[in-house]
Amino acid sequence: MNQFFYIAAGVALISTIMAITGKNAIHSLLYLILSLLAVSVVFYLLDALFIAALEVIIYGGAIMVLFIFVTMMLNIGKEKEMEKKWLKPRMWIIASILASILLVDLILAVKSVKLIPVNEAAILPKQVGISLFSTYLIAVEISAILLMAGVIGAYHLGSQKKKVKHRFLDKA
Amino acid sequence: MLTVPIETQLILAGILFFLGLIGVLVRSNMIYILMSIEIMFNSAGMVFIIASTHWKQPDGQVMFIFILAVTAVEVAIGLALILQVYHHYKTLDSDAINILKDDN
């Protein structure tokens, strides 16, 4: 079983690196879908069967397809050389070094803690559902309100009725 | 049964998180920034799943479902904002939106 974990982890890391360093947005999004599928394999190996299915259906199937539709609507192929011009090494080297220092810090912190393994049966979707609708019922309702606000906000922002800017912005 | 040590699993989630962080800090295309935020959300959820498996409690998986809902809302609003910005400025460069910048 362990070699499957390491293979899936390697695929996830490499495809994520390809996704954030790509020049073509569509290719990067396809790499990101591959990364999410690899993470889903990791979840499956961690005995989180329900979450592995949700990862494929919602992340890979819905959210990423939304991304791809918007990217295709925008037709942003011609901005490739502009982005290459913005990305000079001095622009990204300091941010990458600082983030890498934080990563090394995190790895050392994880390595220094002793965690005791517990051995029982795997968690089934039934347990997740019971916990979701009993202990966390109020959170389910709050996330329903959040989704409602998201629907209204996306509808409002997505409508393109007014082409005129605000009158104060026109002076600038 | 998976016998990979939990440290290795947490380090995988940490590396994915920092790849997303580097993407947010480095890229100036707004589509890529939103994608990197997705990567960071996903790796944070992965830590919940790892902890849920380690302690055999369903709470971590419940938290992942909430993260999924928040992510869906964030992507919908973010993509709508990106569309509006593109229609106003004809570019996706996040440096182009500097109308609040002081000129002096």
Image: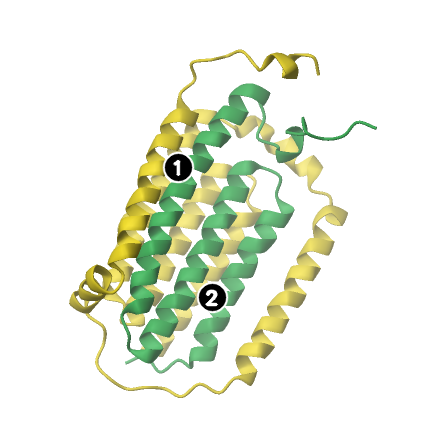
Chain colours: A yellow, B green
The residue depicted at 83 percent of the width and 28 percent of the height is B104
Q: Nearer the viewer, residue B26 or B53?
A: B53
Residue A71 in view here: no
On the image, the x and y values in percent for residue A86 come to 70, 37
Residue B24 in view here: yes
On the image, the x and y values in percent for residue A120 come to 24, 84
The residue depicted at 57 percent of the width and 14 percent of the height is A165
**Does residue B1 sit above or below A162 in this rendering?**
below
Tell me which amino acid carries mark 1. Ala
Q: Looking at the image, which residue sits at the far left?
A: A126
In the rendered structure, the residue with mark 1 lies on which chain? Answer: B
The residue depicted at 73 percent of the width and 46 percent of the height is A91
On the image, the x and y values in percent for residue A93 come to 72, 54
Local SS, label 2: helix
Q: Which residue is mark 1?
A: B76
Tell me which amino acid carries mark 2. Ala
Q: Which residue is mark 2?
A: B13
In the rendered structure, the residue with mark 2 lies on which chain? Answer: B
Residue A138 numbered mark, or none? none
In this picture, residue B76 sits left or right of residue A86:
left
Q: Quadrant of the N terminus of chain A?
A: bottom left
